[in-house]
Amino acid sequence: MTATETPVAVVTGGARRLGRRLALRVAARGYDLVVLYRRSAEDAASLAQEVRALGRSARALQADISRREEVASAFTDIGETEGHVDLLINNVGNYNPQHVTALDPTVWDATLAANLSGAYYCCYHALQRMPDGGSMVNIGMAGLEGIRANTRGADYFVSKTGLLVLTRALAKGYADRRIRVNMVSPGQLENSIDLPPPDEIGQSVPLGRAGTLDEVAEAVEYLLDASYVTGANIDIAGGYRL
Ligand SMILES: NC(=O)c1ccc[n+]([C@@H]2O[C@H](COP(=O)([O-])OP(=O)(O)OC[C@H]3O[C@@H](n4cnc5c(N)ncnc54)[C@H](OP(=O)(O)O)[C@@H]3O)[C@@H](O)[C@H]2O)c1
């Protein structure tokens, strides 16, 4: 395959769930797709097939993004094949609801490595291949701004808060190239692993329901067009923990 002018989107953790929806939505908007997956090879292959049926090119590449060398080699491959990265969506985010008093250091290391360092490795390598005017969207977690004392999942909240700080630093650092870097932060999504029952969700979500994957995708799509928005974090969360 040779490099084309068609914009290329790279979506991490894109084979399943939210990442898959985001990948399909950006492909429907005219991006060729590279989906990075870790274990979900079949889902990644079926996504690539689905995207090709939309008339776009699509490839699935295996990479554990917590491993620097695997990220480097995936982006070398992208550089040689697609030639450029116009949009990076850092969607990987592992959540382990261990209580902070029992938080295992190996879990801490793994969460920070995938959710924060892995996202940075992808930003670093994508930026080497990103034309001026490109874009990055990091998927965060709503309710970050208050830096609340979350006793469960402290490693996760540290990683997502760190990702917000990184988002803002990159936004400022790359503004002279018109590369916009933003964050979209869901709260409780319909597929959340610890979704409260319907009669209790209103206690933490003022709008009284879980968000849909499409509602998150709409925010990502908004950012693709929002030429004057950078360094922003958009909570798509129904007022989660206001
Ligand atoms: N779901 C929610 O309610 C919710 C709420 C707030 C925020 N979010 C955020 O939204 C994003 C997506 O959420 P989700 O629930 O759809 O995610 P998920 O299913 O937990 O994970 C998405 C994908 O991440 C990939 N992944 C994990 N570790 C990886 C690694 N080291 N290297 C490469 N890929 C790795 C996995 O790929 P493989 O399957 O290929 O191994 C997985 O399919 C996350 O950032 C999450 O924090 C979600």
Image: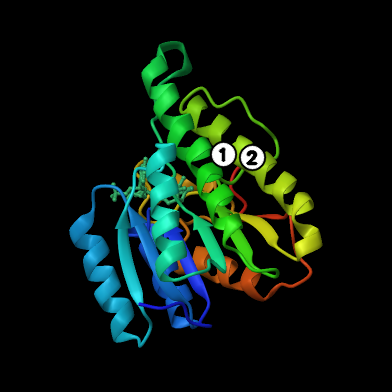
Q: Residue furthest left?
A: 42
Q: Compare residues 214 and 56 and report the one nearer the observer.
A: 56
| Figure disc tally | 2
Question: What residue sits right under mark 1 in the picture?
Answer: 160
Percent x, y of residue 7: 53, 77
Q: Residue furthest bottom?
A: 55
Q: Residue at x 48, y 68 (%)?
A: 9
Which of the 4 image quarters holds residue 111? top left
Q: Compare residues 155 and 114 and report the one nearer the observer.
A: 114
Question: What residue sits right under mark 2 in the picture?
Answer: 144
Q: What amino acid type should be assigned to the residue bearing mark 1?
A: Lys
Q: Residue at x 47, y 63 (%)?
A: 79
**106 in relation to 193, above or below:** above
* Disc 1 C-beta below 8 A from ligand 1: yes
Name the quarter where the N terminus is drawn: bottom left
Q: Which residue is drawn at 70% across and 68% down?
A: 132
Q: What amino acid type should be assigned to the residue bearing mark 2?
A: Leu
Name the quarter where the C terminus is drawn: top right
Question: Is 64 on the left-hand or right-hand side of 138?
Answer: left
Q: Which of marks 1 and 2 is nearer the N terminus?
A: 2
Q: What element carries label 2?
A: loop
Q: Is mark 1 on a helix, strand or loop?
A: helix
The reply to whether residue 63 is in sight is yes
Crowd class of label 1 (few under 14; some 14 to 19; many from 20; radius 10 Å): many
Percent x, y of residue 232: 72, 55
